[in-house]
Image (cartoon, helix red, strand yellow):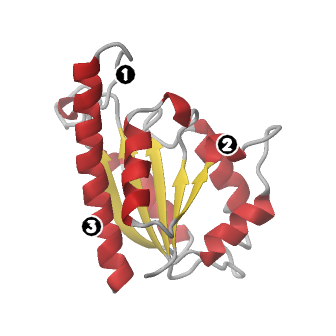
Amino acid sequence: MKNVLIVSGHPNLKTSIANQVILDETAKAFPNAEIRKLDELFHNGTFDIAAEQAAVLKADVLVFQFPFSWFSLPGVMKIWLDEVFEHGFAHGSTAKLGGKKIIFSTTTGAPTELYQKDGFFKHTMEEFAAQFEITAQLCNLDYQGLIYTNGIGYTSRENEEKINAQKAEAKKHAQRLVVLIESLSQA
C-alpha cells in the first residue's frame, strides 16, 4: 500500500456531516492513511510549515477533501496551499513533489442542475476543476481528477431523515474515492 495523505480543508469539521462521513469511511478503508485536519492544525493564523511539508513529502497519493467554497477551496485550505506549496518546495527548479498523485474530492451545497452550462452558475464542475488541474500541473503532480457530490446542503440537526440522506450520499462519495485510491495504490 502506498502512503496516502488526506488533507481535510473543512473550516470547522465538527459541524460537518458529509465531509466527516467521507473522512471516516476513507479512514476505515485505509487505516494507515494520514489525515491532516486543517481546522485543528491552524493556530494563531498559521500552520507548522515544516510538519505539513514533511507529511506531503511522505505521501505517494494526496487527497484534498473539502466543501466547495466560493467555487474553490475553503479559506483555511487556500492559506495552507499558499504556505505549504511554496516556490522551491512544490514548484520551481527545486520542487520536490514531482510524480505524486493528487485527487481533489469535494462536496457542494448547491444541486447538480445549478452546475450546468444552462444552470445558474453557467459552468460544470469539470470546468471549475480546471484550477485544480493547473495547480497539479504547476507542481508536477499526477492529477487524478475531481470526485464530487452536489446537493450536500445545510441540514438542520433536528431533521433525522435529511441527516441520514446526507450521510448516505457521503458514503457513496467515499466509496468512489476509496475505489480510486485503491486503484492508485496498486499501480
Q: Determine the residue positioned at 31% across, 31% down.
A: 152
Q: CA distance from mark 1 to mark 2?
A: 22 Å
Q: Determine the residue positioned at 35% across, 77% down.
A: 184
Quadrant housing the C terminus: bottom left
Front-lying residue, 104 or 14: 14
Kindly state the secondary structure of the residue where label 2 is placed: helix
Q: Determine the residue positioned at 47% across, 42% down.
A: 72
Q: Position of residue 63 (x, y in %)?
A: 46, 61
Q: Is residue 67 left or right of residue 181?
A: right
Give the labeled residue for mark 3.
179
Mark in front: 1 vs 2: 2
Please name the amino acid that badge 1 sits on: Tyr
Q: CA distance from mark 2 to mark 3?
A: 27 Å
Q: Is residue 8 above or below residue 3?
A: above
Q: Position of residue 167 (x, y in %)?
A: 29, 36
Q: Is residue 82 above or below residue 149?
A: below
Front-lying residue, 28 or 56: 28
Give the labeled residue for mark 1.
154
Q: Is residue 68 above or below residue 140?
A: above
Please name the amino acid that badge 2 sits on: Glu
The answer to which image quadrant residue 169 occupies is: top left
Would you say residue 136 is visible in this rendering? yes
